[in-house]
Structure formats: structure tokens, C-alpha cells
Amino acid sequence: MKKQLVIIFLILGSLSHYGQIIPAPASMEFNKGNFELDATVGVTFKGLKKQESTRLTNYLVDKIVAETSVRIASKKKDSKNIILQILQKANKNLGEEGYLLTISETEIHITGNGYAGLFYGTQSLLQYVIHNNTQTPIQLPGLTISDKPNVKWRGMVMDVSRHFYNTKTIKELLDLMAFYKLNVFHWHLADNEGWRIKIKKYPKLTSVGGWRTETPGSIFYKQDSTYAKKLDGKPYKYGGFYTQKQVKEIVAYAQDRNITVVPEIDVPGHSGAALTAYPEFSCEKHVQESPNSTLWNGVVNPANVNLNYCAGQETTFEFLEDVFTEVMELFPSKYIHVGGDEVDKSYWKKCADCQQRLADNHLKDENELQSYFIKRMAKFLEKNDRKLIGWDEILEGGAPINATVMSWRGEKGGIEAAKLKQDVIMTPNNPLYFNRYQEDPKNEPLAVAYSINTLEKVYEYNLIPKELNKEEAQYIIGGQFAIWTEFISSVEYLEYTLLPRMPAFAENMWSVPKNKNYIDFKKRLNQGHYDYWKANGIRFHPKYYKKSVY
Ligand code: ACM
Ligand code: ZN
């Protein structure tokens, strides 16, 4: 008991300069007095469109009641109010997403240039409300915050192909992202292991491509800490997909939280699910039997080893244009991700149609054929007023002029692209792939072992490579971490993988370098964040939980 008291004292006795907020704000000062949050409090808006103010009011009132049981009024009160106000004269320094938050004894005031800023001011306020919700009445400390993000693109890629996650879980992820001020949800919707989005013109994509049957590969995919039970070897059907109505619902839910949903349909490789459903768009034109199933071969149909679209047939492009047309109708995002990674070009070498394409277009080799493929996709997207993003392989054979490059095989591709004046999002697998171990593998559930991506490595990752000068560095528009789900087959394990690395990544992207401090960050995790997750049944890696000294 005594020891516990000492620990509690040590934690509370050394409050972080940033109080309880993650990511650390650009500037923050504590003032005298507290604001008591109770049912006499109201909300009022200035300068917001009716629809936006309704969205934000409902969000704030619902969130406060869910976390505290205090129901504030959704309109102005005579006494204490939370005032959310769009600045009449724009404050250039705050940008699109910045905000000012003041808490005094009589009023809470959040201002910004637009919805995004007010939303983030609301998140900082909510962090204080949630982290103090065991008091009655809830006392919020007087403070003044001026804050904005350091980096424009603060993303997460979520693979729902290797394992499917339903819309409830996707919404939970979006809530966590919003809480830590992340703003891009990159939804990896199609891969060899499953096609997850309903496309009306091609129903077999989901009726066939959305499901896989048990194979040595798919059994392997079922192993993780939460599925430690013995496999019985019986056949099973695994999969699922989102209807278009569900997709629209997720996009709107994200939009309310200042999150853009960027869809990814991976082409020309990683396409085994689609090509099991429609093998006519592969080089073989039919399901190609393979005698072997490999460790990673958890494909929809493990017999079908042709996982690339044929780049020689026009029908492939007609099919993809139809698919992307439906995708664009569902996702308002300017950016559309077409994958482009890990293409096994040996099929193209053997295919008469692909070789004819090479000859007709004077292409030197299959790398140039890949470039031809991606450039056609870019042109199609551009015609529809969208922009292509691809993994760094799109640089091989030449990237489309306006393409944005996601650098995953380390930073090399990102450096090359920035020097070519192409926008870059850094997502190097070491340390930003969260499907990798976060601690010594001997104590951890099964994960990818190529590197150990610890909390500290994620927190300290330097987004701007030293190889770039100041002008080139401007092309690095942000960073993104990745959840690939080969081994992650449960929500519990997903959460364990995410937390606390997600807030570490968020602080790395949002906060200016001078405000970053790893020890202070861990202190703040212990000043409400771990407890918040615990209270909500959200799993996390416990290494630093309730520690007073790091
Ligand atoms: C990737 O990890 N293949 C993008
Ligand atoms: Zn072909």
C-alpha cells in the first residue's frame, strides 16, 4: 500500500508541462481557477454553418455524457458556456487545423479558422474532461492553448483484406484516430486474401473474392495470441465485405472527425482475390493451379497463383476503370491509392498479350510495363479530378508526374521522389509497421519479426531524412503507420498492436520537435490515457503502465 502511494505521488507529483494532452500542444499555459463541468453548462456557436454546428454539438454533448454521465445542454445557457467560434478574420498562423482553447472559471472558448480547428480544440478539451472524469463535480483547470499540427498528413493504413474488421471496429479506430488528431484513414480494401468492398457491376468480387477457405496458408493466418487454441484442420469459410451503404456511413463518420478516408485497391499485383473471381483479367485467363501453398499464401483461392492483372489486355483496364468509377462515387477523397507494390513480373514475361503491349509501346522491359500500367491509372484518375497515390515501386520505370509516393521499403523511395519534386508520405516499415514486434519477441504474441518497432523508435522517428535539403524536404507531406493483419485476427490484438504506439506516432507528427520529449510523453500516458483505454475495455501494451520512472 505504502509503495503504491509513493508511486501515485511520484506520478502526480511530476505533472507534465503539457498536462494531460497527447499530442503535446504547440503552446500551453495554466491559469488560475477551475471550470466546473456540470449540467448547468451549455454550448454555443459563432460563425459555423448550421449543419456543422449541429454535427459538432451532437458530438460534444454525446461524448461528454458517454464519458462522464454529465449531460450539458446543446444550447447557450445564462451561466457557463462552451463557446465554439470561427474567427471572423482568419488567423493565418493557425492554418486549417489549428485552434485556440481557453478555459476560465466562467467559460470555455475554442476558436479556429474552420471546422477542423474547432474539432481539434474540442478533442483537447475532451482529453481533459475524460482524464478527470472520476471527480464530482469535474474540475477542468484554467488554461490557454494555442496549437496546430506540424505535419499535414497524419495517417494510418488499415488492412482489412488479410483479416476482415466490421464497421463497428472501423468506427472505434476512427474514434481513436480523432482523439489523437490523426487525419487520414487509408483503407486497404483489396489484396490476395480478400476483396472487401461491394462493386455493383462485378458482384463476384465480393461473393467469390470476399471469402477464403481453409488451406495451410489460411490456417497460418489464424494464429496469434488470442487464437492460441489448437487448429482442428476442419474446413472453414472466412471473410466478409462492406456494402456501399456501410462505406458511405464510414466516410461520413470519418468526415465528422476531420478524417479523410483514402481507399486503396491494390493493382496490378496483390490482386489474387479479384482474379479468383474474374480470372479472365489475369495473364493466364483462368485459375492457374499451383501444387504448393507457401507460408504467406493465405489467398482466397490458394490454387490460383496468378496474382497480377494482365497489362496486355484492354479488358483489364475497362474492368479497373469501372471498379474505380464506383470507388470514386463512394469516396470524396482527392487521393485514390492504387497500390503498385510487389508485382511479380514473371507472368508478364510469359504472356503474349503483355509482350505485345511492350512492343506496341516501345517499352524496354516489364518495369516500364508496370510504369505504363500505373500511368494509365493516373490519367484515368486525373480525368476524374483525383490524384494517384502508390507505394514506392511506382518509381520503377518512371512514376506519373503528379503521383504521390508512399515510401515503405525504408526511406529510399521517398528521398528519390522528393528529389524529383513529387509529394511523399513516409511509411518506412522500420519503424512504422505496427504488425511488427514492439518488444522482445519471446514475451510477445506472434508478429512479423523483420524489426522490433518499439514505442521509442516510433516516437523518435525522424520524418525528414538528412539527405534532403530544405526545399526538397517540403515534398514530405507527412507520415503514416501501418496495420497489416496477416497475424492480427482479433480486435484485442489489433488494439494491443496500436496502443500506445498510435499516440506516439501522433505526437511525432503533430508536435513541433522542440516540444517532444519521450519521458514526458510516457508520463502523460499515465495521466489518463492508459486509464481511459482500460475503462473502455481497450487493450494496450502494458510495459510503461503505472510506472513512475522510465
Ligand atoms: C507493402 O507493405 N507491400 C506496401
Ligand atoms: Zn498478360
Image (spheres, helix red, strand yellow):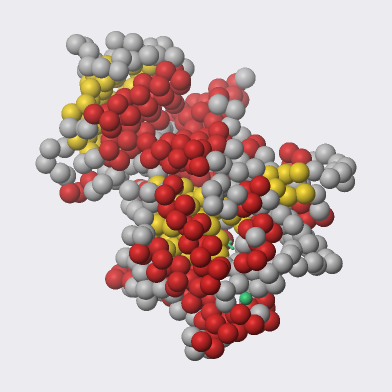
Q: Quadrant of the C terminus?
A: top right
Q: Quadrant of the N terminus?
A: top right
- Provide residue 42's location: percent of width, then percent of height: 27, 16
Toward which corner of the image does residue 415 lie, by quadrant?
bottom left
What residue lies at 65% left-to-right and 36% top-to-bottom? Answer: 492
What residue lies at 65% left-to-right and 66% top-to-bottom? Answer: 280
Q: Nearer the viewer, residue 447 or 384?
A: 384
In this rendering, the answer to whether 280 lies above or below 458 is below
Inspect this view and state whether residue 340 appears.
Answer: no
Inspect this view and state whether residue 397 appears.
Answer: yes
Q: Is residue 52 left or right of residue 509?
A: left
- Provide residue 343's location: percent of width, then percent of height: 61, 71
In this rendering, the answer to whether 160 lies above or below 269 is above
- Provide residue 227's location: percent of width, then percent of height: 76, 40
What residue lies at 39% left-to-right and 69% top-to-bottom? Answer: 379
- Provide residue 490's location: percent of width, then percent of height: 67, 39
Where ligand 2 lies, by image quadrant?
bottom right
